[in-house]
Amino acid sequence: MENKDAVNALAALAQESRLAVFRLLVRFAPEGLTPGVIGEQLGLPAPTLSFHLKTLAQAGLVTAVQEGRFVRYRAEMPRINGLIAFLTEDCCGGNLQLCTPKGNINE
């Protein structure tokens, strides 16, 4: 992953509603959800949700798959894992044993 790609992905996540959409789709990976279900779960109106899904898709974090009359959005897990790997590739000077997460970010 290039710096530019990471910046685009992080910028797409740097908005409260988009982050909520992304986290919901990760929770329902790999099956994904339709926009109607996403909007219902998060209380987002269709035009607002459409805008956020488009931004996440442009960043490569979600994909849309046509299923008959419906579109299903899915978290793009390989891309997400690539972003995490990019962000942590030099963690702890390469000593991966030291990089084990210790818990919640709020701790």
Image (spheres, helix red, strand yellow):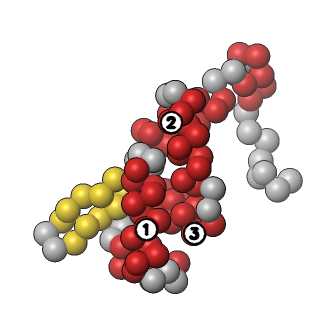
At label 3, the amino acid type is Ser
Instruction: Place residue 18 in its image quadrant.
Output: bottom right
Which numbered disc flags the more N-terminal residue, 3 or 1? 3
Q: Which residue corresponds to mark 2?
A: 5
At label 2, the amino acid type is Asp
Query: Dot 1: what SS?
Result: helix
Structural distance between the alpha carbons of marks 3 and 1: 10 Å
Residue 17 has which mark? 3
Q: Are marks 3 and 2 in contact (CB under 8 Å)?
A: no
- Identify which residue, 40 or 3, lies in the foreground: 3
- Identify which residue, 84 or 44, lies in the foreground: 44
Residue 70 location (% of width, % of height): 22, 72
Q: Are marks 3 and 1 in contact (CB under 8 Å)?
A: no
Structural distance between the alpha carbons of marks 2 and 1: 20 Å
Q: Which residue corresponds to mark 1?
A: 51
Judged from this view, the residue extending furthest toward the right is 107
